[in-house]
Amino acid sequence: MNRLIRCVIKIWDKFWFSRFDPLPLAVFRIAFGILLMVWYLALYVNWEEYYGKLGNIWLYETHAITSYSSWLNVFRWTKDLVPIRVFWWIGFLSAVSFTVGWRTRVCTIILFIMQSSIINQNIMLVNGEDSVFRMFLFYSMFAPLGYCVSVDHYLLKKKQKDCPPQKEEWPMIWAVRAMQINFIAIYVFSLPNKLADDVAWRNGDAIYLSMVSSMWSRQLCPEFFYLFDGLFSKIATYGTILVEGTFPILVWFSKTRMVSILALASLHIFVAIFLNGVAFFTLSMVCGLITFIPPQYIKKIYPRFFLWI
Amino acid sequence: MKFNIKKIFISGFIILNLSCVLLSNRLPFPKIFSQNKIEYKKENSSSYYLTYFKWLVQNYAYYAGLNNQWIMFGRQSRFNWWYTIKAKYNNGEQIVLPLPRQSKRTFVQKFFIDFKEVKFHNNIYESQKSLWAYARYLCEKYPQNKDHKIVSILYQLNWQNIIPREEASRLGRYLDPNIYNQPPREISCHQECPYE
């Protein structure tokens, strides 16, 4: 019994507290930061309408304020004191700073508070990416995002005039692992629900239905998905099920990891191209995949760049 | 093996966060397999503490943002639907408002700026409270047309059925030619929110 407990603790310790090369995390930070910047830019025009006027009507005139929504909403704390536009600049500049890795931890906390405020201020506007951004930012507050390829790292190196950290000085992986597990949970929970909720996922018609929807589809060759007895719809539907269903398992094995990451990234990029209104959500999922890429692959792709950094 | 106090705290924190994800999401097994209902005895202190603990975790999950129910592209719609939103002015004139999904948009507006509009319409669909809030907002945004003041907002729900795939393959088209609509739902600009 004692041996079993020791064995479990050892596995737990190795899984959550091993030291890791934070290079993929730095690439994740840059990709996710750029996505956040673009997202803020896309919101620029409607920011005051969405989170000012419409948000205020929703919160104050529909009795929507609950003990929940009153908290963690910086727009509400500062109502009538700070113009709503100021928060757009705070969010955007934090995203820029997050991307370059300057004061990374502080920026991550600011972005998390901003994201929670955005969600709580106007629940009618919550989209998939809002939830994924908030989840990433929550775990990022504990993860060593600015450990390398960042201004923080550059300044620290300059200050210490030291050689780069050795393997035993690398950070512990637990926050990244928690993010990875939560990321995988998205597929673990949504795939069985898809299969149970809608027969179209079982008979191969799901992609046909989304491709001909005037609401969700960009209408790029919708005919393609019902011609040839729905061959392309079936391939795409069962392909989606296969990729989403196998990813949570295959990603843990070194031999299958890259294949499953590339397959899932392709799926999400396909969704971003063909579907309307979900591009930020699906690209945020591509960002999440970066945390699974082994550092040696990244070093292979951009060896000179990272050598220079 | 070094398993210090710091690691114990972090382990607790990890378990808490992952419990939030587990509590907020459920696998659909009861829908697939028949499952006997679990009955709780009323006067059972352990079940009380369990419920209280669950409540605490759910509160934490809310603030940490870990209370999401992950359903990615789950149920597919069998019809296309859209609202036609009009403003009614005090001379009786009804005008289709120049809103993103019912007016001409530039490429940048359509593919970049309006990215929340589709989900927004999906979120307010048939939600009385949301439709009221949006109507109130539109009343403030378009208060008058020429010299006439706004009276109410009209929502008209339109839909067009999608033909099942086998039939679409045979017919060579995927939409039913008929467009259906509901009588417009009128929301006065001067009415307080009637929904608690």
Image (tube, rainbow, N blue to C red):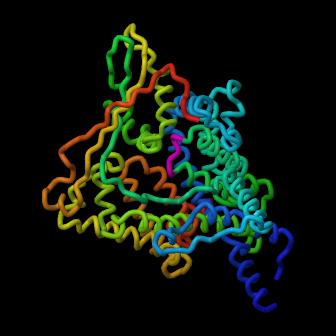
Residue drawn 64% across and 26% down?
A83
Can residue A154 be seen here? no
| In the depicted structure, whether residue A208 falls above or below residue B2 | above
Q: Where the N terminus of chain B falls, by quadrant?
A: bottom right
Q: Which image quarter holds the C terminus of chain B?
A: top right
Coordinates of residue B78 in the picture (x, y in percent): 31, 54
Left or right, A226 with respect to A91, comes to left
Quarter of the image for residue B147 reads top left
Magenta span: chief secondary structure: helix
- Name the foreground residue: A74 vs A154: A74
Q: Nearer the viewer, residue B69 or B41?
A: B41
Q: Position of residue B37 (x, y in %)?
A: 58, 71
Does the magenta portion include B167? no
Taking depth in this image into account, of A184 and B90 the one nearest to the observer is: B90
Residues drawn in magenta: A124-128
Residue A79 seen by the camera: yes
Residue occupying the point 42% across, 71% down: A243
Residue farthest along the left direction in this orientation: B171
Which of these two is toward me, A143 or B34? B34
Tell me if A197 is positioned left or right of A146 in this view. left
